[in-house]
Amino acid sequence: MHKPQLLTILGATGSIGVSTLDVVARHPDRYRVLALTAHGQLDRLVEQCIVHRPRYAVLAEPARLPELASRLAAAGCGEIETLAGIEALEYVACLPEVDAVMAAIVGAAGMRPTLAAARAGKRILLANKETLVMAGQLFMDAARDGGATLLPIDSEHNAIYQCLPQPFSDAAEQGVRRILLTASGGPFRRFSQAELATVTPAQAVKHPNWSMGRKISVDSASLMNKGLEVIEARWLFDLAPERIKVVVHPQSVIHSMVEYVDGSVLAQLGNPDMRTPIAYGLAWPERIEAGVAPLDLFDIAQLNFEAPDLDRFPCLALAFEALQLGGAAPAVLNAANEVAVDAFLAGELDFVGIARVNAATLRGLARDFDAASLESLTAADAAARQMARSLLRLAV
Ligand code: NDP
């Protein structure tokens, strides 16, 4: 019999947060929720509190804190402590009694609490890829110094983790030639340049295989998500960019592969359902049931592979460029992309404009900041947002 693990779920109301709570609810003997955090979806947070009875319910911003407290009291959950603000997010990520932190806030907003969990030596289930994109070296150093355990939740990195030798320390020494990061190609894989210019937000958020939040869905459609994942893999597995190869695989059945020097290629397969990597992260090194249907290979019948088209999807090339530029360049690219995706979702920028804003911001600012401190990275992030917004006003 296990002592239940106590969990903080950052970004509980999002797509990953909801899937995490689904897996947790299947194993009440193994997991207890200590803290849930949300941003705008108060109704959902209250519902989750009623079901999971955490000790803390946290909002990212204080404006609706009184409303949260009174709604919880009215629902018979008055014993739940309500908190708000970035310090509160950091606080619940570091509580001494917390065993594991699911880092599932979207975007740069997730960086500080995830970093706090790393410094506190937590077991971190890392979905928020932006932390690694923005502050890769800093975050990996903090995790090492704090004694944190990192379990990748992004399905590709989770697959790679499963296919690497354990414990993994050095690609060259352990015979890893490269990793093959699979990409579905998104909903516009076959679209021409002219067709891409006219796609709508509604089309972009409709991923063919995965059900995800809006921002990552747009990133998947532009292949920026794959670019962010390349940067994530570079830091997570300490790999030079030339050891990371992106392979378009439209069925999303192989979640990624590791190629060894003896010619072996190990792959992790499964249905495209985030509950698999989430369950893996929760239970590692054990395995638990995740509610995911078994993979039916006869039904799938065929697996296809193709090279990514960097002319139609330049965001992927921008990620390699950012890695080559080094310093705060990935943070600049990430911030520009967050602004551009918001503008696209608000109908203020066309789809192909995302890559234009990203490229112009990256090339304009990449060399102005280093990645040595959180202050410098935060300044790079702010400057990139400002530049991207001014590019939007000029309609790039
Ligand atoms: P969602 O948009 O569905 O959810 C994001 C979560 O973050 C919500 O709980 C949201 O609160 C909260 N949030 C939003 N803005 C802020 C803010 N400023 N401060 C604090 N919290 C905030 O995103 P996903 O679940 O899709 O993605 C979460 C992370 O996981 C991302 O980094 C994504 O790249 C990564 N990921 C997601 C995958 C997926 O399948 N969805 C796959 C692999 C990685 P609220 O909803 O209350 O506004």
Image: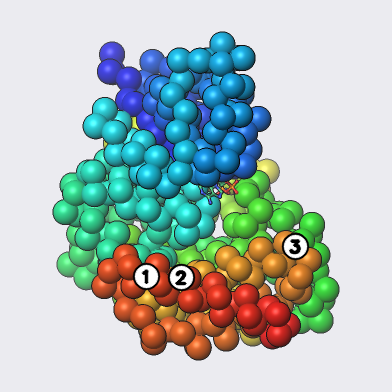
* Residue 54 in sight: yes
N-terminal-most mark, 2 or 3: 3
Q: Tell me, yes or no, whether the two marked residues, 2 and 3, touch with CB atoms within 8 Å.
A: no
Residue bearing mark 3: 346
The quarter of the rendered structure image containing the N terminus is top left
Q: How would you rate the neighbour count of disc 2 (Cα within 10 Å): few for under 14, some for 14-19, many for 20 or more?
A: many
Element type where label 3 sits in the image = loop
User: Which amino acid, by three-letter code, is at mark 1?
Assistant: Leu
Question: CA–CA distance between discs 2 and 1?
Answer: 6 Å
In this rendering, is residue 272 above or below 345?
Answer: above
Q: Nearer the viewer, residue 309 or 251?
A: 309
Q: How far is disc 1 from disc 3 in space, using C-alphas? A: 27 Å
Quarter of the figure with residue 54 = top left
Residue plotted at (39% across, 34% down): 8
User: Which numbered tag is attached to residue 381?
Assistant: 2
Q: Is mark 1 within 8 Å of ligand 1?
A: no
Relative to 186, 118 lies left or right: left
The amino acid on which the numbered mark 3 sits, given as a three-letter code, is Ala
Residue drawn 52% across the image and 15% down it: 77
- What residue sits 34% from the left and 26% below the top? 6
Is the CB of mark 3 within 8 Å of ligand 1? no
Above or below for 340 versus 73: below
Q: Position of residue 362 (x, y in %)?
A: 50, 82
Q: Do the residues under discs 2 and 1 have CB atoms within 8 angstroms?
A: yes
Disc 1 packing (10 Å; few <14; some 14–19; many ≥20):
many
- Quarter occupied by the C terminus: bottom right
Q: Is residue 317 left or right of residue 71?
A: left
| In the image, residue 139 above or below residue 261 | above
Q: Which residue is mark 1?
A: 377
Q: Residue 345: where, in percent of width, then height? A: 72, 62
